[in-house]
């Protein structure tokens, strides 16, 4: 879980960059008070990527506590699929090695 507080009197360029990096993880809670200069952009991003946006620090603390207690449903977001590892069969290896040698020959000697 990532909790982010954007202070009203700052422009927070690094925090906004980090928000862009982590909004797709759906693990972020953003506290952005009314009057923040990029609040509209943040609202659009939260709507698009299902981020949790709160307006006050008290709401941020409450949301973090709720998630820490376990009321936050971990199964709400699908798990990442396992990486697909495609193994090279001996048949593929047998026919690819001569092609590599031919390509090497043309690159070096011609």
Image (spheres, rainbow, N blue to C red):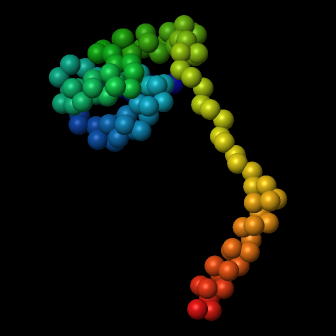
What x and y, as percent, mark residue 3? 43, 25
What x and y, as percent, mark residue 31? 33, 21
Nearest the eye: 97 or 84: 97
Q: Is residue 68 visible?
A: no
Q: In the picture shown, does residue 4 fall above or below 12?
A: above
Q: Is residue 21 visible?
A: yes
Left or right: 21 in relation to 70: left
Q: How many marks?
A: 0
Outermost residue toward the top? Answer: 71
Q: For the point 61% across and 85% down, which residue is it?
A: 106
Q: In the picture shown, does residue 98 fall above or below 9?
A: below
Q: For the point 32% across and 21% down, which residue is it?
A: 47
Q: For the point 58% across and 16% down, which residue is it?
A: 74
What x and y, as percent, mark residue 59? 36, 11
What x and y, as percent, mark residue 57? 34, 16
Left or right: 55 in relation to 34: right
Q: For the point 58% across and 92% down, which residue is it?
A: 110
């Amino acid at each position: 879980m990532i909790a982010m507080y954007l202070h009203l009197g700052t422009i927070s360029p690094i925090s906004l960059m980090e928000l862009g990096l982590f909004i797709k993880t759906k693990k972020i809670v953003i506290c952005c008070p009314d009057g923040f200069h990029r609040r509209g952009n943040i609202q659009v991003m939260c709507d698009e990527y299902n981020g949790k946006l709160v307006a006050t620090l008290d709401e941020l603390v409450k949301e973090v506590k709720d998630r820490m207690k376990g009321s936050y449903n971990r199964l709400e977001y699908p798990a990442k699929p396992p990486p697909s590892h495609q193994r090279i069969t001996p048949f593929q290896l047998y026919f690819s090695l001569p092609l590599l040698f031919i390509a090497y020959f043309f690159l070096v000697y011609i």
